[in-house]
């Protein structure tokens, strides 16, 4: 599918009419798609678990942060490439800050700025809170001719969200996330869904019981999963998928931010939460 062109206000109005940058949950349509802009690193489209829709990421770092958001129990919605409308307000704020507002390349048309992630969090009292997150590689802040423009754009973005009542805006870099966490989440995500025979609650609970029995002493993660899979009467590859799935469902809890998960490495300390499986099963039933 070819990228869209922004040459006139009519183009922008047409894309708004088609629903780009609007909606929430499964109905949200990102303002920008991977084919619309050149990306830094490898862009990709990924099926979301929380939203049930296809997400559009312009870099590997955006994908990495998305994995963190999906794993978070507090996050209830993720909207990437979120537009900062109305543009007129953004232009006014830029003028107040003494920042030249950007235009689409080769035109006099004012650019539609966007934030990498608009995230909906669920607060302890059940209410929802919106937070904005911008994702940048650390190299963007090295001395260069573009550094001033990069910093100004971030200042403008933060000011626009503040004017719209979203005070929780933060910058995310690869150092913010940490290599261990991202490596673990990429490995775990392969267990985001299971074949029908592994979706049965009794199979998952039996696997957890076996893990709880065998998680003693220093043994490799592979050895522990193999023992639990044998006790559950499932093949070892299915046991690996079950382990990943149950970590993602928070039925197995461990420190994935600081301890690398490798099948040949020593299994990190973990705790079992059977109630997480019962909760997930109830949600599916509802």
Image (cartoon, rainbow, N blue to C red):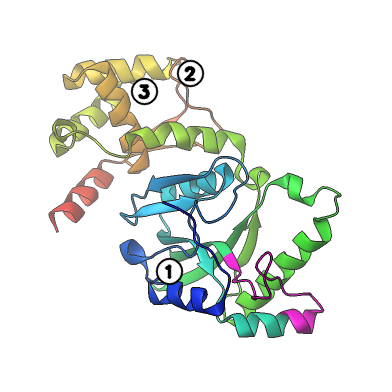
x, y percent for residue 7: 58, 70
Spatial separation of the CA atoms under disc 3 and disc 2: 11 Å
Q: Which residue is mark 1?
A: 20
Local SS, label 3 = loop
Residue bounds of the magenta highlight:
94-114
Label 1 or label 2, whichever lies nearer to me, is: 1
Label 3 or label 2, whichever lies nearer to me, is: 2
Quarter of the image with the C terminus is bottom left
Q: Which residue is mark 3?
A: 215
Q: Which residue is mark 2?
A: 266
Label 3 or label 1, whichever lies nearer to me, is: 1
Local SS, label 1 = loop
Q: Earlier in the sequence, mark 1 or mark 2?
A: 1
Is 72 in front, or is 52? 52
Is 126 in front, or is 143? 143
Spatial separation of the CA atoms under disc 3 and disc 1: 49 Å
Q: Quadrant of residue 26?
A: bottom left
């Amino acid at each position: 599918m070819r990228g869209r062109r922004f040459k006139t206000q009519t183009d922008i109005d047409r894309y708004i009419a088609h629903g780009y940058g609007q909606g929430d949950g499964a109905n949200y349509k990102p303002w920008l798609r991977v084919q619309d802009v050149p990306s830094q690193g490898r862009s990709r489209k990924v099926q979301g678990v929380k939203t049930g829709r296809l997400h559009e990421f312009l870099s590997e770092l955006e994908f990495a942060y998305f994995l963190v958001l999906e794993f978070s129990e507090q996050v209830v919605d993720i909207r990437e490439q979120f537009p900062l409308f109305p543009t007129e307000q953004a232009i006014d704020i830029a003028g107040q800050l003494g920042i030249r507002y950007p235009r689409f390349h080769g035109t006099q048309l004012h650019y539609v700025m966007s934030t990498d992630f608009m995230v909906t969090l669920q607060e302890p009292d059940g209410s929802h809170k919106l937070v904005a997150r911008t994702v940048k590689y650390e190299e963007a802040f090295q001395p260069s001719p573009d550094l001033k423009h990069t910093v100004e754009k971030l200042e403008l973005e933060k000011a626009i969200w503040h004017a719209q009542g979203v005070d929780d805006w933060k910058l995310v870099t690869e150092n913010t996330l940490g290599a261990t966490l991202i490596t673990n989440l990429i490995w775990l995500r392969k267990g985001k869904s299971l074949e029908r025979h592994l979706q049965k609650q009794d199979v998952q609970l039996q696997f957890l019981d076996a893990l709880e029995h065998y998680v003693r002493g220093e043994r490799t993660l592979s050895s522990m999963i193999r023992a639990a899979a044998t006790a559950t009467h499932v093949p070892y590859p299915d046991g690996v998928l079950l382990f990943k799935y149950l970590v993602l469902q928070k039925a197995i809890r461990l420190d994935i931010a600081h301890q690398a998960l490798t099948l040949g490495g020593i299994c990190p300390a973990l705790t079992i939460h059977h109630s997480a499986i019962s909760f997930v099963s109830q949600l599916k039933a509802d």
